[in-house]
Image (tube, rainbow, N blue to C red):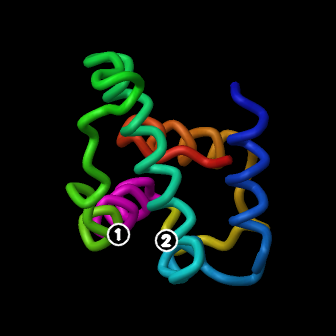
């Protein structure tokens, strides 16, 4: 388990612990933060596969990653997790681990 990611997820979920998980991940600041993390992760993956070209400059284009697509991805993960209608204070460790794994499988990471 990556404890930096764990800390990031827990901070997001318990920032407003009385809100539903679904509402927490509909917050525009949370979406922006996760979108930036998603772009960073995709850029790292792109550089691993293709290597750096042009003296360290890659052909990665951040404009290919639309905020709306990322938002839909986040909403789908939360809805499919089975805990969208629960509150953070009612979840246990395994629920948070499962949520983090679902996000990581889709390429969304916390930092």
The part of the chain drawn in magenta is 71-82
Question: Is the residue marked by circle 2 packed among few (<14), some (14-19), or many (20+) residues within 10 Å?
Answer: some
69 sits to left or right of 110: left
**Rendered image quadrant of residue 94:** top right
Residue shown at 70%/29% (left/top)? 2
Residue shown at 26%/65% (left/top)? 66
Distance between the alpha carbons at the discs numbered 2 and 1: 6 Å
Residue 73's spot in the image, x, y percent?
Answer: 31, 59
Which label sits on residue 71? 1
Task: Relative to 97, say whether 49 is above or below.
Answer: above
Does residue 74 show up magenta in the picture? yes
| Labels 2 and 1 touching (C-beta < 8 A) | yes
Closer to the N terminus: mark 2 or mark 1? Answer: 2
100 sits to left or right of 93: left
20 sits to left or right of 45: right
Task: Relative to 20, say whether 52 is above or below.
Answer: above
Task: Relative to 57, say whether 89 is above or below.
Answer: below
State the residue lying farthest toward the front. 55
Residue shown at 32%/70% (left/top)? 67
Residue 78's spot in the image, x, y percent?
Answer: 43, 62
Residue 93's spot in the image, x, y percent?
Answer: 74, 43
* Majority secondary structure in the magenta region: helix
SS at mark 1 in the image: helix
Residue shown at 75%/55% (left/top)? 10
Q: Which residue is mark 2?
A: 31
Which label sits on residue 42? none
Does residue 73 show up magenta in the picture? yes
Question: Is the residue marked by circle 1 packed among few (<14), some (14-19), or many (20+) residues within 10 Å?
Answer: some
Q: Quadrant of the N terminus?
A: top right
SS at mark 2 in the image: helix
Q: Nearer the viewer, residue 23 or 62?
A: 62
């Amino acid at each position: 388990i990556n404890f930096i990611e764990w800390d990031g997820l827990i901070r997001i979920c318990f920032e407003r612990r009385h809100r539903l998980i679904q509402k927490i991940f509909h917050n525009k600041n949370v979406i922006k933060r996760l979108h930036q993390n998603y772009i960073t992760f995709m850029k790292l993956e792109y550089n691993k596969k293709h290597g750096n070209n042009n003296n360290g400059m890659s052909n990665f284009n951040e404009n290919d990653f639309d905020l709306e697509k990322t938002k839909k991805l986040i909403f789908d993960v939360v809805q499919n997790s089975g805990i969208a209608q629960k509150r953070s204070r009612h979840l246990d460790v395994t629920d948070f681990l499962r949520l983090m794994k679902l996000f990581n499988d889709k390429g969304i990471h916390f930092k």
